[in-house]
């Protein structure tokens, strides 16, 4: 998926969970895996602070970009992730997040399976592939699973609770 946006001169963009392809506008790209284009590895289930070995300064970025990565954070830690994103954003900063609509995915799963279509892709949309490419150790990367899901209404409530406008 290609995300286009206008980056103004002097703005800094943090990309969370860049995966196999870094966004061209990202000043800093982080992921849970060591990849050639990743600036540093982070665990999005932990605070982005020096105590946890992943220091990102407060109010450092104008925008945070996350494309299909926030669903890989434990639902138990998701509120903390949103608060961390708020913390690293400059005042007036923006979160640009793309994630799946769990309600629509579940609805499609029921419709397809009721119609006799038992293709694994319907399960993978909800739970993730859970076996996507090599991890740092060269074996299958089993963390490619979805640990949280929401519909637009619930995500909006969580964002507001975390301090987003």
Image (cartoon, rainbow, N blue to C red):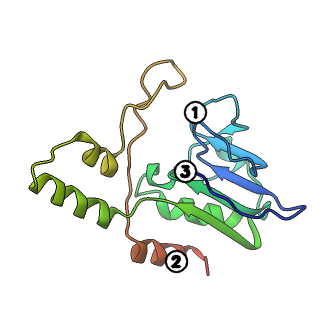
Task: Please state the horizontal and vertical placement of residue 87, each as a whole percent of the image.
Answer: 69, 65
Dividing the picture into quarters, in which one does residue 108 lie?
bottom left
Task: Please state the horizontal and vertical placement of residue 143, each as a whole percent of the image.
Answer: 43, 37
Which is closer to the viewer, label 3 or label 1?
A: 3
Task: Please state the horizontal and vertical placement of residue 39, each as a whole percent of the image.
Answer: 73, 38
Residue occupying image coordinates x 61% and y 81%: 165
Q: Nearer the viewer, residue 15 or 112?
A: 112
Q: Earlier in the sequence, mark 2 or mark 1?
A: 1
Do tag 2 and tag 1 residues touch (Cβ < 8 Å)?
A: no
Determine the secondary structure under disc 2. helix
Determine the secondary structure under disc 1. loop
Q: Earlier in the sequence, mark 3 or mark 1?
A: 3
Which is closer to the viewer, label 2 or label 1?
A: 1
How dense is the environment of label 3, judged by Cα within 10 Å: few (below 14), some, or many (20 and up)? few
The residue labelled by disc 1 is 33
Residue 1: assigned label: 3
Residue 14: assigned label: none
- Is 64 on the left or on the right of 153, as rendered? right
Residue occupying image coordinates x 61% and y 41%: 31
Compute the Cα span from label 2 to label 1.
29 Å
Residue 5 shows up from this direction: yes
Q: Nearer the viewer, residue 129 or 46?
A: 129
How dense is the environment of label 1, judged by Cα within 10 Å: few (below 14), some, or many (20 and up)? many
Residue occupying image coordinates x 31% and y 52%: 126
Compute the Cα span from label 3 to label 1.
20 Å
The residue labelled by disc 2 is 161
Q: Residue furthest top?
A: 138
């Amino acid at each position: 998926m290609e995300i286009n946006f206008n980056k103004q001169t002097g703005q800094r963009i943090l990309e969370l969970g860049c995966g196999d392809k870094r966004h061209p506008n990202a000043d800093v790209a982080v992921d849970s895996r060591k990849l050639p284009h990743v600036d540093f590895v982070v665990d999005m289930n932990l605070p982005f602070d020096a105590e946890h070995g992943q220091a990102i300064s407060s109010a450092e970025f104008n925008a945070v970009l996350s494309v299909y990565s926030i669903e890989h954070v434990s639902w138990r830690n998701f509120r903390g992730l949103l608060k961390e994103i708020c913390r690293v954003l400059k005042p007036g900063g923006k979160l640009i997040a793309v994630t799946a609509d769990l309600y629509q995915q579940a609805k499609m799963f029921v419709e397809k399976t009721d119609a006799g279509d038992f293709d694994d892709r319907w399960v993978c949309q909800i739970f993730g592939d859970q076996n996507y490419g090599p991890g740092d150790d060269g074996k299958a990367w089993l963390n490619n699973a979805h640990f949280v899901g929401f519909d637009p209404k619930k995500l909006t409530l969580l964002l507001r609770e975390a301090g987003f406008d």
